[in-house]
Amino acid sequence: MNKTFTNKKPFTRGYHREYTPPAEAQKKILPFKEKVTLHIPEIKNGIRIIPLGGVEGIGANMTAFETERDIFIVDAGFSFKDESAPGVDYILPNTKYLEERKHKIRAVLITHGHLDHIGALPYVMPGLGNPPLYTRLLTAVMIKKRQEEFPHLDALDIRVVEKNQTIEIGEMKVRFFSVTHTIPDAMGIIFETPYGNIVHTGDLKLEHEDGKASETEIKEYAIFKDMNVLCMLSDSTNTERPGFSIPEHRVIDNIGNIIRNTKGRIILGAFSSQLERLVKVIEIAATLGKKVVVEGRSMKGHIEIVEHLGMLKVPRGTLITGDEMGNHPADRIVVLATGAQGDEFGALMRAGNKTHRTLKIVKGDTIVLSSSIIPGNERSVQKLKDNLSKQGAKIIHYQVSDVHSSGHANGDEMRWIHDQINPRFFIPIHGYHYMLTAHGNIALARGLAKENVIVPDNGMIIDLIEGGTKAYIQPERAPSAKVMVDGSSMSDVQDMVIKDRRMLSEDGMFVFVVVVDSQTGTLKKSPDIISRGFVYLKESQDLLRTARTIIKKCVEDITTNQPLHTIDGDQLKHAVAETMSRFLMQKTAKHPVVIPVILAV
Ligand SMILES: [Zn+2]
């Protein structure tokens, strides 16, 4: 028979959660709740620039530009989960500042179609009042396609622009220019303000030969000659690396030679975001009379889009399905596959694990891993290479041959871009603080004054005031706490859930079940203990014995000294859990999630 301890809070069967982590654990949590920004004065006689995401890490790029009348937003990306938030799907820029000034927003401008620039759109556009969205064609189609996954949202008002076009949005003249990146239709944006132009380059690198910019690049950047550029904001991802990055044409030449000279089947593992390279590889394969199979959902999606837009020029029948592969000799086949990072569900990884339906690795296959290894993925890539080579494949990767290059400029390459744009103020964006600092140093080396180079944090309000002659950093920040997307829910709180996940992933969980005799208040039997991911129970018998004794004493101290119906069940569980948590911390230096279950029978 179950008894209730009080009639207010019934004591139910089952697993009750009742645990408050110690203050030390709470401190690790990011400050999700922020004060409302009431004291930020409006911008007058100048331009306000606020990086809202993408400057304290990689991804979640978003920058706001504000004048007295208008707000323009550049990019709305997400970043993928990191260790600080286990189980979270994406992290978004914080748009609270913008939402409070929704009436001023005139446009969202998107530099290119990578997810760290478009990924947040479905989540943030409704809150921004669904303003018109300006971007180039491929990006527009990619955004539209992605929006189909969110059928409950209002349609976006997307307006396609082209490079070298100048348009008027409200009172602002906005001009676009083409930049080299890893996806077609990447662009930079120029805001023509009365104080001078503001240039946002987006992500970019250069086409060059041994450090000499190509003719095309020289022509593209010629627009900046004699232009009065007040401020430039630019990609910092690789600027700490010296020299120039490997030009993409060399990567393409190398892959082309491999395809030309290899007997047997070629399987190329790459990021689906390297869309320009994928297109070129398909075109090369086609000129060599080979068939191309695309494996992996994201890659298939992207190739379908470029094919549809006429950006992929190959004879009909070049692209075949995995099922049709068997109809052609192996040396007539090139496979493009996702999973070069060792990601669990990538096509290449499944082939390595022999779980892919159509892609079976055989002796004689040559696998080109046309991607670098993202830090943290080293072990899974190692495993991938092992699995593939055990099945007889030959593996070529970026450490043995130039089969990959990043889409972000190195230091000297970026210096060239600075020299062309020649800004008065410079704000490095896209990267961790140390990357931004390295990029800032490039501007300083060019002779910019220290006070004209601003290395920002997320939410920093940078006002170019007095007609754009001076930079002033507001003491108040725009809200910048990380916004998490977790499954379908989105919030900047979620802290309890994430805290639990973090503790579970780091120190596991510790459950104890106590059965109290409702007549006597004593324990009917020794507490049961279940733990996962905490300690190896078999080797921790002493610890468990002491834990049982403490639990028993702690419960009975309360339950035998007063009538059961007067005891608050939640408080009882809370007290015992806290004691146990402290004990486990002392003994093991671990903070498992402690779950007390106390039943009265
Ligand atoms: Zn990019």
Image (spheres, rainbow, N blue to C red):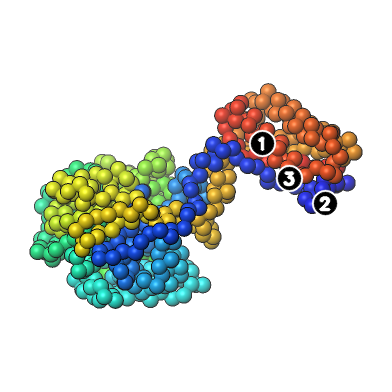
Q: Residue at x 40, y 42 (%)?
A: 376
Q: Could you tell me the amino acid type at mark 3? A: Asp
Q: Could you tell me the amino acid type at mark 1? A: Glu
First along the sequence among labels 3 and 1 = 3
In-front residue for pair 527/41: 41
First along the sequence among labels 2 and 3 = 2
Quadrant in which the C terminus is drawn:
top right
Q: Residue at x 67, y 33 (%)?
A: 580
The answer to whether residue 350 is seen in the rendering is no
Q: Which residue is mark 2?
A: 7
Q: Against 411, is 164 above or below?
A: below
- Label 3, label 1: how far apart the Cα atoms are: 12 Å
Mark seen at residue 570: 3
Percent position of residue 68, x then y: 30, 69
Q: Against 200, is 400 above or below?
A: above
* Secondary structure at numbered mark 3: helix
Q: Residue at x 33, y 46 (%)?
A: 432
* Secondary structure at numbered mark 1: helix
Percent position of residue 6, x then y: 82, 48
Percent position of residue 14, x then y: 75, 47
2 and 1 marks in contact (CB < 8 Å): no
